[in-house]
Image (cartoon, grey):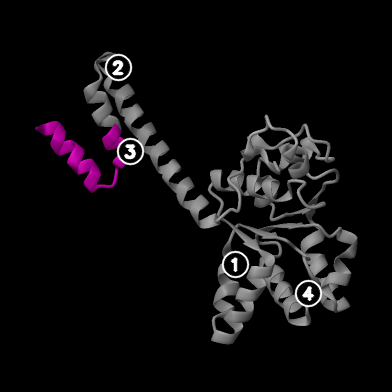
Amino acid sequence: MLSNQTINRLHQMKLTGMAQALVDQMEKTGFNDYSFEERLGLLVEYEWTYRQNKRLAILLKQAKLRLDACMEDINYAHPRKLDRKLIKTLSTCQWINAHHNVIITGPTGIGKTFIACALANAACRLSFTARYYRLPRLLQDMALARADGTYHRVLSRLAKTDLLILDEWGMSPFNDTQSRDLLELVDDRHLLHSTIIVGQIPLEHWHQLLGDPTVADAVMDRLVHNAHKIKLDGDSMRKILAFDDSAPASNEEK
């Protein structure tokens, strides 16, 4: 009776993990050999792990990552000039603490989005907030926000995200309004938060994409000068895996 009351109290205090661990200890005789301090320590450890896992699930849901990717699954065997040392360094997420950016470029099907999502997954595991966007869709949303009066609210939300992923950068040249929207976005985040840019267009052609030279210089200055650059090259991983019947489908573009 007393044990049931204790479990109910733990649930009422939102100590769900500890309640589950207590039930586990009550049902298994092996815990009788543990001291009070050891059993209490296990309860606290279970609660801590439960909360960490719950927070991670929330962060990943909010991130809306395009791919279920993690650092451990990145493919280094495929010849695409992927710098393993750089990826290992980025996996620590110290670059996010330093408010640096990452720029990933390369041809279609080479695994750019997978790497970006894996980096975002690693960030979420360290309790950073992240959000993935296809840039063409985000620019459309910003145009609609300007029309309905929520533009500054959208910018404010984007500015607060620890790690922002902008995929499909430069699918087509930006018009003047889009270039200025990008400047507003990156200026709000400059030296405060981190951004991952993913696209096929080489860095040296970005000025042409952004149009107005003054705006282009400002955008480039805020994105590039403190960025870690991942420049991939090689055959499409989709094409290679299509000929390998033994390769699991989930390995595409890793």
Compared across the picture, whether 207 is left or right of 164 comes to: right
Position of residue 66 relative to residue 181, above or below, is: above
Question: Label 4 to label 3, Cα distance in Å?
Answer: 50 Å
Specify few, some or many for label 2: CA neighbours under 10 Å numbering under 14, 14-19, or 20 or more. few
Residue 183's label in the rendered image is: none
Which is nearer the N-term, disc 1 or disc 4? 1
Q: Are marks 3 and 1 in contact (CB under 8 Å)?
A: no
Question: Label 1 to label 2, Cα distance in Å?
Answer: 49 Å
User: Amino acid type of disc 3?
Assistant: Gly
User: Amino acid type of disc 4?
Assistant: Phe
Q: Which residue is mark 3?
A: 17
Q: Which residue is mark 1?
A: 158
Specify few, some or many for label 4: CA neighbours under 10 Å numbering under 14, 14-19, or 20 or more. many
Q: Are marks 4 and 2 in contact (CB under 8 Å)?
A: no
| The one of 184 and 107 positioned closer to us in this rendering | 107
User: Amino acid type of disc 2?
Assistant: Tyr
Q: Where is residue 133? Give x, y as percent.
A: 63, 62
Pair 1/4: label in front: 4
Position of residue 24 relative to residue 53, above or below, is: above
Q: Which residue is mark 2?
A: 34
Element type where label 1 sits in the image: helix
User: Amino acid type of disc 1?
Assistant: Leu
Which is nearer the N-term, disc 2 or disc 3? 3
Position of residue 198 relative to residue 148, above or below, is: above
Element type where label 2 sits in the image: loop
Tell me how many marks there are.
4
Compared across the picture, whether 167 is left or right of 227 comes to: left
Q: Where is residue 145? Give x, y as percent.
A: 58, 80
Question: Label 1 to label 4, Cα distance in Å?
Answer: 19 Å
Tell me which segment is drawn in magenta. Answer: 1-20
Q: Where is residue 108? Give x, y as percent.
A: 78, 52
